[in-house]
Image (tube, rainbow, N blue to C red):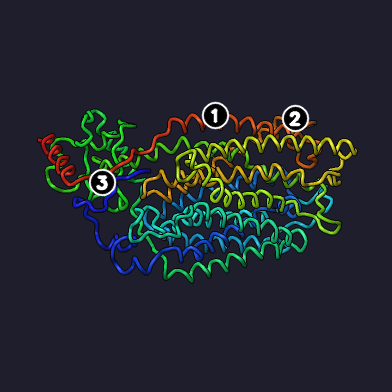
Amino acid sequence: MELQENDGEEGSSYPSQQLVDKGIGDGSSSKSLGGFRTMPFIFATEIGERFSYIGFHSNLITYLTQQLNLPLVSASNIITNFNGTTNFTPLIGALIADSFAGNFWTLIVGILIFQLGMISVTTTAVVKSLHPPPCPSQVDCKQPSVTQMGSLYFSLFLIACGLGGIRPCVVTFAADQLDMKKKPGSPREDKSSGWNLFNWYYIMDGLARLAAFTVVVYVQDNIGWGWGLGLPTIAMAVSIGIFFFGSPWYNRVKPKGSPMIRLAQVIVAAVKKRTFDVPNNSELLYRNDELDAAISVHGRLLHTSQFKWLDKAATVKPGELSNGNPPNPWKLATVHRVEELKAFIRILPIWAASILLVMATSHNHSFLIQQGRTMDRHLWSSFQIPPASLSVFSIFTLVIGLIAYERLFVPIIKHFTGNPSGLTALQRLGVGLCFHVLQTAVSALVEIKRKAVAAEYGLLDHPEATIPMTVFWLVPQLSLQGVAEVFTNVGQLEFMYEQAPESMKSIAVGLNWIGSSVGDYLGSTLVLLVHKYSGEEHNWLPDRNLNRGRLDYYYWLISAIQVGNLVYFSICAASFTSNPAAKAAEEDGDRTRDEQLVTHLA
C-alpha cells in the first residue's frame, strides 16, 4: 500500500510525544528503544510458542486415538475444530491490540494464558483419573468420561485464548521495533531489517517446529506423555522469561483506536448521504490532516476512484463545517478513513483464496500420521521414525527453501521481473498454490501405491501390521508441501501486512488467521460429509482400518478443489489494484485544495 508521505509537509501537525513514542522523532527514546537488538527477545516468544504448540499439537491425533481411545474421524474433527478456534481468536486479539491495549500488553496476556493452557493439558496426561485406561489392542476400548473430555476441552480453550493474543501481535510488534515504513536513507534506517522480516518470522517458526517434531514427538512415543507434554510447557516458561528480560528496550506503539469503529463510521456516513452526489473534483472531498494524525503517521492514503459510492461519506454538505469544530465522524469521514475501508475491501477477495486452501489441506497431517503408522519407519534396525515426526521433511524443506529463495532465487529472478523482491506478494502466492495442487496429486498417487503393496502382501484386513513399504515414499509430498509454504505462507502474510492501512496491521494479521479458522471448520464439514456419504463397505475415510479406505479418492477431491481455487485466485489477482503511487504534496497544492473547498461550500 502506497501512501502520501507526511514528512516535511508544513500542513501536517503531529503531537511531538507521539513521534517520540513511535521512535521517529528526535527524542532520546528513538535512540534507546526498538531496533534489531530487540528481535532475539521477541522471536524467543515466537520460538517458545511454536515449539510448545507444535510439540503438543503435532502428535495430538495419537494422544486422542491411543490415550483417550477416540475414533479416528472424531479425533480428527476435534483437532480441526480446535484449529479453527485457535485461528479465530487472533481476530479478537487483534481488535483488542489495535483498539486500546496495544501489541505489547495483548502479547503479555496471551502468553500467560497460553502457559496456563499448557500446564492444564499436561495435567490431563499425568493424572490417571483424567484419561481412560490404556487399550493397546484398540478394540472395544473404554471411551473417555464426560469429566475427562471436559478437562481436555478446558485445556484446549485456554490454549486457543492464549494464541489469540500471541499470533496477531508477535510479527506486528517486531515490525514496530524496526519501523518498517521508514523512508530509505532516514536517520533511523535500520540496515539489519533489510532482510525480509516475514522470512525471518517463518524461519524461526520452522526451526521451532523442526525441534518439536523431532525431540518432543520422540519423547512422547518412547518415554511418555507426561514428559512429552511437560517439555513444551517448560520451554514456553523459559521463553516468557526471555521476553520479559527484553522489555526495557521495546518500542511500545500506542493503539490508535478501534479501526472497526472507523470502518463502521464510514459506512454509516455513506448511507446517510446516499442521496447526495459525489463532486467530480476529488479535491473537494473532506480532508483533515490533524484529525487523521494518529492513524497516518507514515503518510495519508490518496483518494482512489474505486468503490466511488463510499466517497459519499467524505462529501461535505453546505454548512457542515461552519462551526469550526471537528465534524461528527458518523456523518462525515475524511478521505483517509474512506480509503482505509476501500483498502480493507480490496484485500478480501485475495484473502478468501486462503480459506479454500486451508479447507483442502486441514486434515492432511492427521491422515499422514495414520498412513505413516502402517509403513516401515526404520532408519536402522533399532530406530523407527515416529509417525508424527514425518513433518520434519516439509519443515526442513521450508527452512532451506526460505533461505534459498532470498539468497539464490531473488537475485536471479529480479533481473527478469524488475522487482527488487523478485516476485510480488501476489505472484508468490500464485506459485505456492500451484505447488499445493501438485502436492495433493502426489499424495493420491502414493496412497494408491501404499494400498497396492498392502493388497499384494494380504494386509488389507490387518491395520496393525506393518506394510513392507518404506515411509520415505511420503517424503516427496512432504517436500512439495514445504516448497508450497515457502511461497504461500510468506506471500499471504506479506500481502496482508503491506496492503492493510497502518492502523490495521494487527487486524490484517488476525484476518489471516481467520481465513485459516474458516478453512478448518469447512475442512471438518468436508470430512464429515465424505465419511457419511461415501458408504459403509468402501468408506473413503474409515474410523479404524485405513487399508480398506479410499483416502486416495479424498486426495483427488481436494486436488480438484485446489485447482478451482487457483483459477479463482488468478482472476482476483489479475483485477487487484492497490493505491496509486503518491508524491508528497506541495504547500501550494494544499493551499489550492483548501481554497477550492471553501469556494465549493460558499
Is 413 left, or right, of 23 in this rendering?
A: right
Which of the numbered marks, if any, corresponds to residue 324? none
Give the quadrant of residue 586: top left
Q: How crowded is mark 1: few (under 14 residues within 10 Å), some or many (20 or more)?
A: some
In percent of width and height, residue 297 lies at: 30, 53
Q: Nearer the viewer, residue 257 or 449?
A: 449
- Residue beneath disc 1: 567
Quarter of the rendering occupied by the C terminus? top left
Indicate which disc, 2 or 3, sits on the residue closer to the N terminus. 2
Amino acid at dot 1: Val
Amino acid at dot 3: Ala
Is 176 left, or right, of 464 in this rendering?
A: left
SS class, disc 2: loop
**In this view, 462 is above or below 188:** above
**In this view, 567 is above or below 348:** above
Q: Which of 531 and 506 is in front in this view?
A: 506
Residue under the image location 55 percent in, 45 percent down = 409
In percent of width and height, residue 536 lies at: 77, 32
- Residue beneath disc 2: 535
**Is there a contact, CB below 8 Å, between mark 1 and mark 3?**
no
Q: Is residue 183 visible?
A: yes
**Is there a contact, CB below 8 Å, between mark 2 and mark 1?**
no
Amino acid at dot 2: Gly
- Residue beneath disc 3: 584
C-alpha separation, residue under disc 2 versus residue under disc 1: 31 Å
SS class, disc 3: loop
Residue lying furthest left: 602
